[in-house]
Amino acid sequence: MNEPYVGDAVILDAALSERAGHWFLAERAYGLWYLPGRSSYRDGAGLDLYTRWTRWSLANPFVSLYGEYRVGTELRGRGFPDAHRLRALLGVALPSAWGDIMAYGFGDVGNRYGIRGLTNEATLGIAVRFALGTPPAP
């Protein structure tokens, strides 16, 4: 086994959202505890913050920040290092009755996931996402 293995975990996840005037805010925090001998990580935690300005009905600027940290452990005789990731999104959401079209730029730094989990990189990009569901009302 040369790459980290993200195995079975118990996850405690809490989230909430609220409005403050023309602002829509959403927060999420979680903790991870991996079962011994079932992962390259012992435990970890993450935080997700989302802020959206809803004053205009046609376009809502937003920013989203995410961070996580996982503590490495030993698995099958090999020690694995800690892993981290930070990500930021900045863009605009175009709300409709069907959902949002979100155009944004993003940047992240930290460890990748999966077979590239030991790789530490920084990336920049742009994206368009269609999110089904009711957007936050103005």
Image: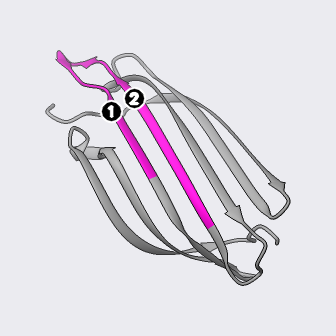
Which amino acid type corresponds to the residue marked 1 in the rendered image? Answer: Ala
Marks 2/1: CA distance? 5 Å
Residue at figure coordinates x 64%, y 42% from the top left: 28
The picture quadrant where one finds residue 56 is: bottom right
| Image coords of residue 34 (percent x, y) | 44, 24
* Relative depth, front residue between 14 and 21: 21
- Residues under numbered marks 2 and 1 in contact, where contact means CB atoms less than 8 Å apart: yes
User: Is 124 drawn above or below residue 126 in the view shown?
Assistant: above
**Secondary element at image label 2:** strand
| Image coords of residue 30 (percent x, y) | 58, 34
In the rendered image, the quadrant that contains the N terminus is: top left
Residue at figure coordinates x 71%, y 81% from the top left: 98
Residue at figure coordinates x 47%, y 41% from the top left: 67
Q: Report whether 1 appears left or right of 28.
A: left
Find out whether residue 54 is within the magenta segment: no
* Relative depth, front residue between 42 and 63: 63
| Image coords of residue 124 (percent x, y) | 33, 62
Residue at figure coordinates x 77%, y 67% from the top left: 136
| Image coords of residue 3 (percent x, y) | 19, 36
Q: Which residues are magenta?
A: 62-87
Q: Report whether 42 appears left or right of 128.
A: left
Q: Residue furthest right?
A: 21
Residue at mark 2? 70
The picture quadrant where one finds residue 19 is: bottom right
Q: Residues within 10 Å of mark 1 (few under 14, many from 20)?
A: many
Residue at mark 1? 83
* Relative depth, front residue between 37 and 88: 88
In the rendered image, the quadrant that contains the C terminus is: bottom right
Earlier in the chain: of badge 2 and badge 1, it is 2
